[in-house]
């Protein structure tokens, strides 16, 4: 029974649904604020930038960018209709004005135009991408030449590293990014959040 519960909660974190999905969506906003603020700072946002968040959840990062940065346009993508409703509520005014939009989609096949973004980022979404290679290709397709991507995840807790995440980064993500055409790829150390260690994998499109 306990294993079934943990499986259910893990599924909710991947794609929040139903009434509990609203709770999970807002819970993630509170849990992830330190790494969210840090990730936004890494984007080095400018007035002309168009920005895409993959796995935007309840829209906190989008809201933070829209309120504090004079970017041109922000788009949020998520697979969960439940959290997109929360994101719409949190960013309703900017969506109505046309400065922001929300898209219901998986990350490996995005209904967005080629070379339409200067910055793409995600926070705690990478673990759930079912086709990593396809998702990286989509990021590369959507970025303008010289555009940047920042992918933030946890790689350990309380001083202990997670080998599975290290393998994901070093054995899969970075090689795929290199092969796809990203350069200046680096792993940046982020803040601890609730004991979890955070890192960001950054890269630029040639």
Image: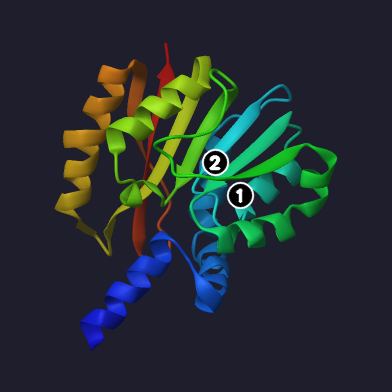
| Dot 2 alpha-carbon crowd within 10 angstroms: few under 14, some 14 to 19, many 20 or more | many
| Dot 1 alpha-carbon crowd within 10 angstroms: few under 14, some 14 to 19, many 20 or more | many
Residue 83 in the image, given as x and y percentages of width and height? 57, 61
Residue at 36%, 30% in the rendered image: 136
Q: Residue under label 1, please give it.
A: 61
Query: Marks 1 and 2: in contact by CB < 8 Å?
Result: yes
Q: State which tag comes first along the sequence, 2 or 1.
A: 2
Q: Toward which corner of the image does residue 203 lie, by quadrant?
A: top left
Q: Which element carries disc 2, helix, strand or loop?
A: strand
Q: Toward which corner of the image does residue 49 lie, by quadrant?
A: top right
Image mark for residue 53: 2
Residue 135 seen in the current view: yes
| 4 on left or right of 119 | left
Residue 5 in the image, given as x and y percentages of width and height? 30, 82
* 203 shown above or below 84: above
Residue at 37%, 49% in the rendered image: 153
Quadrant (top left, top right, bottom left, bottom right) of the N terminus: bottom left
> How is colour applied across the structure in the image?
rainbow
Residue 154 in the image, given as x and y percentages of width and height? 34, 53
| 193 on left or right of 59 | left
């Amino acid at each position: 029974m306990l294993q079934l519960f943990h499986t259910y909660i893990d599924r909710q974190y991947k794609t929040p649904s139903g009434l509990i999905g609203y709770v999970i969506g807002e819970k993630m906003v509170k849990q992830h604020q330190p790494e969210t603020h840090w990730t936004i700072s890494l984007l080095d946002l400018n007035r002309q930038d168009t920005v895409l968040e993959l796995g935007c959840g309840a829209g906190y990062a989008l809201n933070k960018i829209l309120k504090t940065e004079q970017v041109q346009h922000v788009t949020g993508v998520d697979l969960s209709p439940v959290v997109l409703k929360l994101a719409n509520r949190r960013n309703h005014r900017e969506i109505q004005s046309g400065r922001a939009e929300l898209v219901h989609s998986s990350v490996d096949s995005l209904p967005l135009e080629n070379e339409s973004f200067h910055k793409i980022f995600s926070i705690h979404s990478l673990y759930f991408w079912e086709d990593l290679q396809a998702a990286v290709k989509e990021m590369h397709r959507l970025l303008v030449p010289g555009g940047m991507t920042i992918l933030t995840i946890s790689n350990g807790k309380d001083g202990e590293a997670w080998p599975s995440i290290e393998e994901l980064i070093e054995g899969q993500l970075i090689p795929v990014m290199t092969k796809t055409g990203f350069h200046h790829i680096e792993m940046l150390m982020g803040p601890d959040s609730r004991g979890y260690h955070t890192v960001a994998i950054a890269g630029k499109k040639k």
